[in-house]
Image: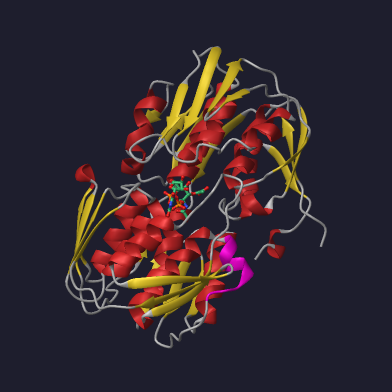
């Protein structure tokens, strides 16, 4: 099959209503909790994206049956069996590393491929390993495979994360929710996805106290979990920001963004309100922003500005007046996307962990590569404001996290076309 190309004809003048899908970075950890259960689970508003399908394939391989339709997913965990987690597709997906926690809880051991670094920079797992060690689990490396096993029974544990890693926080919560004794984790990540993961586990009988202000979680391990009701996955906050930015860049009339859990955007609503975006009870209204003074964005752990949205901000900054800056304290090297944006004419300067973009600039369509999911969506935004045709390759990265991307853009009035049917993706 030839590689997919996504073509956008710009500049786009958009208006209308768009509903975000369920959160990718919540759906993936939720699926990684499935091996903790022996019963049926139901999730609603599950995003139909490639990463979810990769996780589902892994669940199938361990005997967890699933059925899904209309974004409702039913899992039957009654026939769970142990398998090594070493398929190549899984190791490309960082979130699959969270199966370690549920496997260690259920089986006392896990074998998994080390997740690789990627376009957004080094992605070590040292905090995961140190935290799991405090829970009595040892990790041994054999090439790119890690063998985990329980080496001592730990009932009570306290561990301080040296950095509030989202994945390591989720790993430790999933590893501790069942078992015995009490666990305390300090300097944890407090991203909304962590909060919602805790809500899910609590709704199944987990005893977890979350103190986001103190960056602390306290867990009384319980003997088992049981899902009482379907869990609705809240809207994806990064997709929400994507549509807000689409409005600010191309909304010749209002774009109404629906389906976002507003509380999840509390950390960015002030910034967007200062750009004219309105946060109403049932929708967010975003409209084209003209002649705005350029911005200074610093991506930091929550409640800071999200690193996943900084590549999109680069496109906005190219339209601001004067000097705009983006610094990323989470992934200091997450700027590879700028060289692709420069093919559309975007000029920038990179000084260590800070990108400097002086606007306003005119962009022009060209051929570009979506090197990762957020780089890809930044290119889509840039393609929408550029004149002429932008052809995006390596579209599979966008398929990993954005459900119905063209359908939503077409409904807003964009001229966007894939040269392939979506069915091939899944
Ligand atoms: N880090 C370590 N050691 C560790 C773990 C992390 O040094 O053991 C460092 C990383 O190298 C990075 C920083 O800590 O510099 C933050 O990494 P974190 O562990 O918080 O990120 P993650 O859990 O691997 C999740 C999201 C990412 C998002 C980050 C930060 C999922 C599946 N992924 O990754 O999402 O950028 O948190 O918010 O939840 C995306 O959706 O495009 C994406 C990359």
The correct choice, above or below, for 370 with respect to 325 in the image is below
The correct choice, above or below, for 351 with respect to 397 in the image is above
Q: Quadrant of the N terminus?
A: bottom right
> Is residue 410 in view from this perspective?
yes
Tell me what residue is drawn at x 42 percent, y 62 percent. Answer: 29
Identify the image quadrant of residue 91: bottom right
Q: Position of residue 415 (x, y in %)?
A: 71, 37
Q: Name the side, left or right, on which 138 lies relative to 407.
A: left
Q: Name the side, left or right, on which 372 lies relative to 237.
A: right
> Is residue 42 in view from this perspective?
no
Q: Nearer the viewer, residue 423 or 339?
A: 339
- The magenta segment: 85-92
Q: Nearer the viewer, residue 358 or 44?
A: 358
Q: Main secondary structure of the magenta part?
A: helix
Tell me what residue is drawn at x 49 percent, y 54 percent. Answer: 124
Tell me what residue is drawn at x 22 percent, y 79 percent. Answer: 223
Q: Position of residue 408 (x, y in %)?
A: 59, 45
Total marks in image: 0
Q: Name the side, left or right, on which 217 lies relative to 132.
A: left
Q: Nearer the viewer, residue 332 or 140?
A: 140
The correct choice, above or below, for 391 with respect to 426 in the image is above
Magenta stretch holds residue 91: yes
- How is this picture coloured? secondary structure
Q: Position of residue 282 (x, y in %)?
A: 36, 40
Q: Quadrant of the C terminus?
A: bottom right
Q: Position of residue 300 (x, y in %)?
A: 40, 36
Magenta stretch holds residue 258: no
Identify the image quadrant of residue 231: bottom left
């Amino acid at each position: 099959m030839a590689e997919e190309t996504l073509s956008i004809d710009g500049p786009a003048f958009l208006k209308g209503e768009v509903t975000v899908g369920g959160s990718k970075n919540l759906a993936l950890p939720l699926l990684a909790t499935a091996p903790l259960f022996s019963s049926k689970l139901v999730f609603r508003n599950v995003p139909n994206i490639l990463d979810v399908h990769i996780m589902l394939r892994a669940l199938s391989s361990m005997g967890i049956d699933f059925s899904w339709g209309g974004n409702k997913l039913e899992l039957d965990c009654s026939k769970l069996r142990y398998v090594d987690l070493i398929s190549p597709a899984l190791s490309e997906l960082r979130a699959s590393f969270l199966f370690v926690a549920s496997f260690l809880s259920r089986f006392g051991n896990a074998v998994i491929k080390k997740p690789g670094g990627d376009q957004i920079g080094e992605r070590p797992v040292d905090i995961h390993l140190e935290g799991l060690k405090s829970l009595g689990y040892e990790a041994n490396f054999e090439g790119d495979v890690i063998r985990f096993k329980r080496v001592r029974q730990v009932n009570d544990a306290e561990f301080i994360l040296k950095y509030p890693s989202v994945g390591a926080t989720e790993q430790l919560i999933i590893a501790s929710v069942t078992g015995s004794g009490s666990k305390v984790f300090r300097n944890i990540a407090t991203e909304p996805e962590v909060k919602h993961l805790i809500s899910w586990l609590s709704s199944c009988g987990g005893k977890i106290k979350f103190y986001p202000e103190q960056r602390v979680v306290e867990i009384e391990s319980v003997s088992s979990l049981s899902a009482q009701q379907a869990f609705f996955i809240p809207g994806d906050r990064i997709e929400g920001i994507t549509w807000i930015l689409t409005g600010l860049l191309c909304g010749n009339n209002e774009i109404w963004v629906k389906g976002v859990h507003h509380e999840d955007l509390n950390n960015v609503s002030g910034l967007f309100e200062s750009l004219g975006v309105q946060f109403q009870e049932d929708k967010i209204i975003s409209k084209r922003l003209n002649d705005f003074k350029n911005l200074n964005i610093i991506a930091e752990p929550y409640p800071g500005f999200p690193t996943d949205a900084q590549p999109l901000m680069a496109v906005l900054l190219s339209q601001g007046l004067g000097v705009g800056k983006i610094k990323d304290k989470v992934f200091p090297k997450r700027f590879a996307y700028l060289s692709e944006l420069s093919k559309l004419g975007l000029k920038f300067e990179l000084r260590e962990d800070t990108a400097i973009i002086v606007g306003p600039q005119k962009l022009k369509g060209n051929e570009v590569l979506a090197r990762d999911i957020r780089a890809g969506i930044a290119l889509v935004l840039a393609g929408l404001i550029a004149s002429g045709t932008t052809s995006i390759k390596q579209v599979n990265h966008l398929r990993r996290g954005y459900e119905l991307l063209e359908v939503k853009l077409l409904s807003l009035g964009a001229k966007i076309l894939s040269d392939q049917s979506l069915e091939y993706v899944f």
